[in-house]
């Protein structure tokens, strides 16, 4: 006789074991919602296991986005799960914190004190749409005031991220993507004159080109536009897509003049969830002053008792990412951001030195002077005995996700490989990666890969 009674053993008890439950004995429904409910813990565990197939974010060296957050960020995100960013009347403090973040960024990017305006977005893509729309509206108003046609707007840029192609297509603007010159990684100031005209709504300069992670020379592009204005009278504004660089340059390259210090820069976007260190789902756009954001684009919704100005492509959106962004500003301060980004940059340089020393690679970006990242190509693609796609596949066997992809169309014959060193990617980790690259090179030496027409389609990667 036991001293105390235990729970009766039976089928009920078996149900409490996740992997002995009826649901775990089935393939999960994929096309039709099941008729009956299931225990939370069982469903959670099954989904948790399925998600392991995604690979782990810590070894994803392809992404610019935050893959590590402090516990406090997780807690704040959890506490803000029910806060809707759009309900500025119901969650006035979340709205207030969004405004503080805009002010902090305007200050960080040297906007004239008190004049700037801006908002949070879901990321740089939405911010780019808003920035592009403001440029288009301003250009159209100017043309109409001059009694000139305003039906053929164009936007001039270099090798932009796909969001600008989307903007151009969705909002009916001709995208004039200036071809990359041989050896170049971005838009050159001397190239502008051949592409800018009276119908140019703006030029986009990129601080941290997605392909190679270098900065385009924003100040020189601005100077070229000054010369174009002096010659033709066209006052073409500059928008800086600082998706990554907006949170790196102020800390690592404070003397690089790319922001509102240049009078021609009217707006800047950045991704809070990239080097801004916030969790996924937040971007920012700041305009130099309210006059650069046409009133017609701002909706003053009389909603649930409040009159709230909004400029956004969507309506409901979570508020947690914005709170987390403010947390990070307070938690790290300028010195903290500097230290985090400097650590990443040092790690990137260390990795770059190792890659350079291995033999077959030529660096395109070594982590100096731009984003904490490394980008390289094969010095002799035809004689190497393997392609970068083969190397990506080989590294994938160890869990590393290191993308290989061709440069934009005009330099598409150059295939590059790129590693983003983000907060949480450590020196030790990159040393292990370098060892794995060396081992892969030895493997290719012993077992050369025959050149294959399918190579180019492997390890696809989208920016
Ligand atoms: C990532 C990126 C974007 C898109 O930003 P999201 O925050 O992912 O929407 C736009 N431009 C550049 C230069 C980028 O690196």
Image: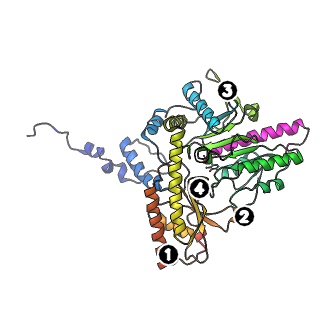
Residue behind label 2 places its C-beta within 8 angstroms of ligand 1? no
Q: Classify residue 318 by image quadrant.
A: top right
Q: Nearer the viewer, mark 3 or mark 4?
A: 4
Which structural element holds mark 1?
Answer: helix
Distance (Cα) linking label 3 and label 4: 46 Å
Please indicate whether residue 449 sits to the left or right of residue 5 in the image: right
Q: How many angstroms separate mark 2 from mark 1 (CA)?
A: 30 Å
Circle 1 sits on which residue?
Answer: 444
Distance between the alpha carbons at the discs numbered 4 and 1: 30 Å
- Viewer-closest of 175 and 197: 197
Q: Which residues are magenta?
A: 124-152
Q: Farthest residue in the right direction?
A: 147
Residue 434 position within the rendered picture, expressed as x and y whole percent measured from the top left: 47, 64
Q: Earlier in the sequence, mark 2 or mark 4?
A: 4
Q: Earlier in the sequence, mark 4 or mark 1?
A: 4
**Which of 303/334 is in front?**
334
Is residue 312 placed above or below 248 in the rendered structure?
above
């Amino acid at each position: 006789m036991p001293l105390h009674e235990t729970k009766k053993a039976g089928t009920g008890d078996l149900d409490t074991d996740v992997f002995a439950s009826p649901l775990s004995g089935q393939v999960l429904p994929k096309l039709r919602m099941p008729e009956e409910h299931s225990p939370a813990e069982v469903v959670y565990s099954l989904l948790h296991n399925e998600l392991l197939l995604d690979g782990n974010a810590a070894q994803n060296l392809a992404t610019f986005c935050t893959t590590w957050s402090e516990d406090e960020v997780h807690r704040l995100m959890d506490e803000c799960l029910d806060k809707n960013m759009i309900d500025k009347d119901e969650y006035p403090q979340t709205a207030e914190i969004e405004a503080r973040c805009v002010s902090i960024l305007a200050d960080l990017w040297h906007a004239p004190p008190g004049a700037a305006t801006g908002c949070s977005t879901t990321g740089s893509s939405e911010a780019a749409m808003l920035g592009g729309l403001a440029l288009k509206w301003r250009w159209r108003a100017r043309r109409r005031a001059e009694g000139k046609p305003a039906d053929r707007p164009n936007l001039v840029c270099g090798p932009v991220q796909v969001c600008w192609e989307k903007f151009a297509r969705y909002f009916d603007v001709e995208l004039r993507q200036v071809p990359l010159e041989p050896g170049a990684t971005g838009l050159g100031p001397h190239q502008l004159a051949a592409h800018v005209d009276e119908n140019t709504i703006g030029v986009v300069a990129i601080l941290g080109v997605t392909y190679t992670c270098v900065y385009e020379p924003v100040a020189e592009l601005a100077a070229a536009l000054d010369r174009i204005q002096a010659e033709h009278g066209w006052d073409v504004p500059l928008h800086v897509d600082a998706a990554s660089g907006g949170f790196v340059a102020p800390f690592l390259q404070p003397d690089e003049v790319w922001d509102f210090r240049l009078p021609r820069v009217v707006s800047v976007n950045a991704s809070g969830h990239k080097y801004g260190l916030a969790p996924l789902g937040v971007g920012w756009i700041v305009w130099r002053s309210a006059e650069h954001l046409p009133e017609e684009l701002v909706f003053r919704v009389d909603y649930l008792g409040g009159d709230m100005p909004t400029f956004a492509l969507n309506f409901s959106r979570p508020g947690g990412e914005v709170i987390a962004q403010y947390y990070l500003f307070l938690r790290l301060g300028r010195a903290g951001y500097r230290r985090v980004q400097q650590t990443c940059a040092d790690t990137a340089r260390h990795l770059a030195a190792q890659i350079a020393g291995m033999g077959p690679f030529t660096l395109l970006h070594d982590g100096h002077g731009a984003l904490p990242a490394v980008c390289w190509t094969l010095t002799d693609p035809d004689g190497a005995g393997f392609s970068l796609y083969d190397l990506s596949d080989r590294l994938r066997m160890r869990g590393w996700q290191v993308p290989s992809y061709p440069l934009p169309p005009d330099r598409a014959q150059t295939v590059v490989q790129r590693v983003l060193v983000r907060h949480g990617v450590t020196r030790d980790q990159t040393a292990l990666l370098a060892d794995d690259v060396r081992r892969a090179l030895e493997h290719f030496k012993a077992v050369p890969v025959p050149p294959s027409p399918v190579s180019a389609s492997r390890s696809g990667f989208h920016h």
